[in-house]
Amino acid sequence: MARMKFICDAERCIECNGCVTACKNEHEVPWGVNRRRLVTVNDGKPGERSISVACMHCTDAPCMAVCPTDCFYKTDEGVVLHDKDLCIGCGYCFYACPFGAPQFPQAGAFGLRGKMDKCTFCAGGPEVNNSEAEFKKYGRNRLAEGKLPACAEMCSTKALLAGDGEIIASIYRQRAQTRKKGEEVWGWAMAYKMDGKIAPLGVKS
Amino acid sequence: MVQVPALISRRISSTTGYPEFDHVLMKKLGWWSELTEAEQKAAEGKNWKTDLSGGIQRVVLKVHGCHPFGNAKARAVVWNFPDGIPQHREPLYSPRPDLVAKYPTHADKMAFWRLPTLYKTVQEKNKDISKEYPLVLTSGRLVEYEGGGEETRSNPWLAELQQENFVEINTKDAESRGIKNNQFVWVTTPTKAKIKVKALVTERVASGTTFIPFHFSGWWQGKDLLDKYPEGSAPIVRGEAVNTATTYGYDSVTMMQETKTTLCQIASA
């Protein structure tokens, strides 16, 4: 059985937000709920990198561990999903998640958050596959149609890979091998043969 | 401006142009010895494009004032271009009066596409305007939006990603003006226009240059014009339109307005 995973190749990510827009469109995610988002470090400086972050569908998911109503479940393919009908919007999963994946649609009085929403790996929820109810609550179920997540499909540079962990790991490994070293060495210095030292644009090291 | 030294025209007589600079030509001209030892090692067998040391380019450009690519043979005469070969001409609004003197723009055209189009008079009049407007302002695109922005700013997925118009300003320039990241600023230009945008303090732009995306509209001098839109027709995101502040200028070759090469001053709002 395939074990579904995401890898975002920070060397290829160009911060185009294609993945974010694809996810929003595919599942009609409301304003303010960010299932997937881009994180950029060193913006505007040499060594700027971006990475696309959503639910990482952890093996020992902390969200699942802390949920007081036990609304989370794991599919055979390792996708972490939850049942919005059981969710009480307590926010514990948000506190537990190191990636900030759980999102809440409301910021009401007395901590009223509404039902937790997060990336589903395009695998919907406990409702009947591809039903109207499933779409309204969880978005489209692409996995049930034999497709891969919309974000990875739309990635303009194929930085974001999603699918069977074995397959995407081997793709990423091949990229790393072609680049010869790690992502930290790829760049102008490597392309212009400066003994592997990182050189900012236009500066010889 | 191509400056072909007499040296070359003596040693390589040609009525069809001059070859590109490679190691062979450098040796023929006697310029090879002006490369350093390390440069010579890298440039042996190479031309100006493939010499990774940059030595050929350095000697050709800096020492002898030549274009390394040679100037070959013109394949055609472009009748309607004002310059036979491309010349640098300073924009009408330039931060460098010395470059304006050295590389002036064209003479005014009395009738260009049936309209009087000014060049020289505008440039002369605004030679020293950079004292008041010292920062270069350029405009450009964002990934999230397209063109004037009315369609893409009405799309909820895209609008959420860029919710405010902004000016990218260098960290040093912001500091000297007491501007903090994400605060409102007034951008003023030689047309006496003023637009109110958020400041994005960053090192993306060099000191002396600023950037504003041109996809926004729906604000006028700091005021959101939402109540002027017919019910339900306003885009989700509105902002200042940078071209309400950019200056006069029309490039006769590309037929493009000079909205990407203008000057501004920025101050806290």
Image: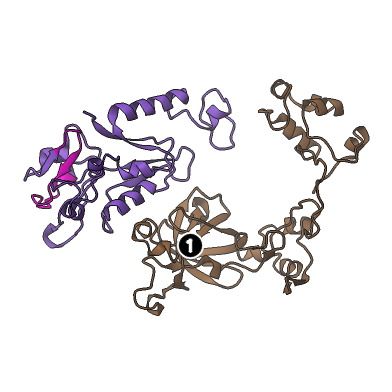
Chain colours: A purple, B brown
Which is nearer the eye, A37 or B137? A37
Which is nearer the eye, A145 or B206? A145
**Is B190 placed left or right of A98 in the picture?**
right
Provide residue B67's location: percent of width, then percent of height: 77, 40
At x 32%, y 28%, the residue is: A167
Determine if residue A99 is in view. no
Q: Which residues are magenta?
A: A74-94
Secondary structure found at label 1: loop
**Above or below — where is B83 with respect to B67?**
below
Q: Main secondary structure of the magenta part?
A: loop
Q: Residue A82 lies in magenta, yes or no?
A: yes
| Residue identified by numbered label 1 | B215
Dot 1, how many residues are within 10 Å of its Cα: few (below 14), some (14-19), or many (20+)? many
Q: Residue A148 lies in magenta, yes or no?
A: no
Amino acid under disc 1: His
**Is B247 placed left or right of B194 in the picture?**
right
Q: Count the numbered circles shown.
A: 1
Which is nearer the eye, B80 or A183? B80
At x 44%, y 43%, the residue is: A14
Question: Can you say which quadrant of the picture contains the C terminus of chain B?
Answer: bottom left
At x 47%, y 45%, the residue is: A44
Q: Which chain does the residue under circle 1 lie in?
A: B
Provide residue B14's location: percent of width, then percent of height: 90, 37
**Above or below — where is B4 with respect to A117?**
above
Determine if residue B198 is in view. yes
Provide residue B138's location: percent of width, then percent of height: 57, 58
